[in-house]
Structures are given as C-alpha cells and as structure tokens.
Image (cartoon, rainbow, N blue to C red):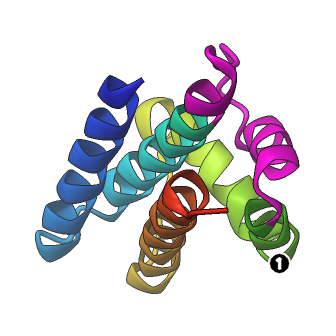
C-alpha cells in the first residue's frame, strides 16, 4: 500500500507548487487527490484492500471507523470536503474558479489528513 502514500505525497507536493504559481483550480484537484489517496492508504494498510471509490465522504466514513480522529475531522469540515469532492470533476471538466483562500483551506486539510493518517498508523498502543 506504500504506493498510495507515495502518490499522495506527490499530489501534495504538486499542490504546494501550484499554489505558488497561482493555479488555484489545480491546487484544489491535487489536494483532493492527496486526501483521497491518504485515506485509501490508511484503509488498505489496516484492512489489506481499499475501496475503489472517488467519494471523499465515503472514504472519510470508512477511514473514520478505523481512526476516530479522521471522522472528527470529517464532521468539522464537511462543507470543505464537499467542495473538494467537486474539484475532482470540476477542475477538469468545468469552468470552475477557486480563490486563494479556498484552496489554502483545501491544502491545509490535506496536510492534516496526512498527519492524522500517520499518527493512526504508527502510534504504539
């Protein structure tokens, strides 16, 4: 499952570079991809396989059953997560616009998901 984490890390790095370049629509897309893959990484690492879905809401619910901190993060950020879900399609197929503030929030959420996933996977009982 390490490939999922590696790909998530690459999407996150890309989002940070795109933010510097002012490519806000692509920051949203890359942040969404990072979150999606971090959640799949956690689920796959714990269960041996991961859901073949693109729904962040479903992935957060599934991951939240394995790591309660992720479910709490989901509950606190449901509107932002909905915006990120739309970015998966909207950034590619629609004339969608995002503000710098919006994508910074998305990027911060992706960083927080990475942090929580790592804590959940590597903490000692």
Residue 52 is covered by the magenta coloring: yes
The percent coordinates of residue 64 (x first, y second) are 82, 51
Determine the image quadrant of residue 107: bottom left
Q: Residue furthest front?
A: 125
Where in the figure is residue 24, as x and y percent of width and height?
Answer: 33, 64
Residue ID at (13%, 64%): 17
Residue marked by disc 1:
76
The residue sitting at 65% across, 32% down in the picture is: 46
In the rendered image, the quadrant that contains the N terminus is top left
Q: Position of residue 77 (x, y in %)?
A: 76, 73
Closer to us: 108 or 96: 108
Tell me the element at label 1: helix
Give the residue at the far bottom of this rendering: 101
Task: Indicate whether 83 appears above or below 91.
Answer: below
Please state if 36 lies on the left or on the right of 95 as rendered: right
Instruction: Give the overall secondary structure of the magenta segment.
Output: helix
User: Could you tell me which quadrant the C terminus lies in?
Assistant: bottom right
Q: Residues within 10 Å of mark 1 (few under 14, many from 20)?
A: few
The magenta span reads 43-68
Q: Which residue does the image show at 70% across and 68% down from the upper left?
A: 80
Q: Quadrant of residue 53?
A: top right
Up/down of 106 relative to 4, above or below:
below
| Residue situated in front as seen by the camera: 84 or 99 | 84
Residue drawn at (38%, 81%) of the image: 100
């Amino acid at each position: 499952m390490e490939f999922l984490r590696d790909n998530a890390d690459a999407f996150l790095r890309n989002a940070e570079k795109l933010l510097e370049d002012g490519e806000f629509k692509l920051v949203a897309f890359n942040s969404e991809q990072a979150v999606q893959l971090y959640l799949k990484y956690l689920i796959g690492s714990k269960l041996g396989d991961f859901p073949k879905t693109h729904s962040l809401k479903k992935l957060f619910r599934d991951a939240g059953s394995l790591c309660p901190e992720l479910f709490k993060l989901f509950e606190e950020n449901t509107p932002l997560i909905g915006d990120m879900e739309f970015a998966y399609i909207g950034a590619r197929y629609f004339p969608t616009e995002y503000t710098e503030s919006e994508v910074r929030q998305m990027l911060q959420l992706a960083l927080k998901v990475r942090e929580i996933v790592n804590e959940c996977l590597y903490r000692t009982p």
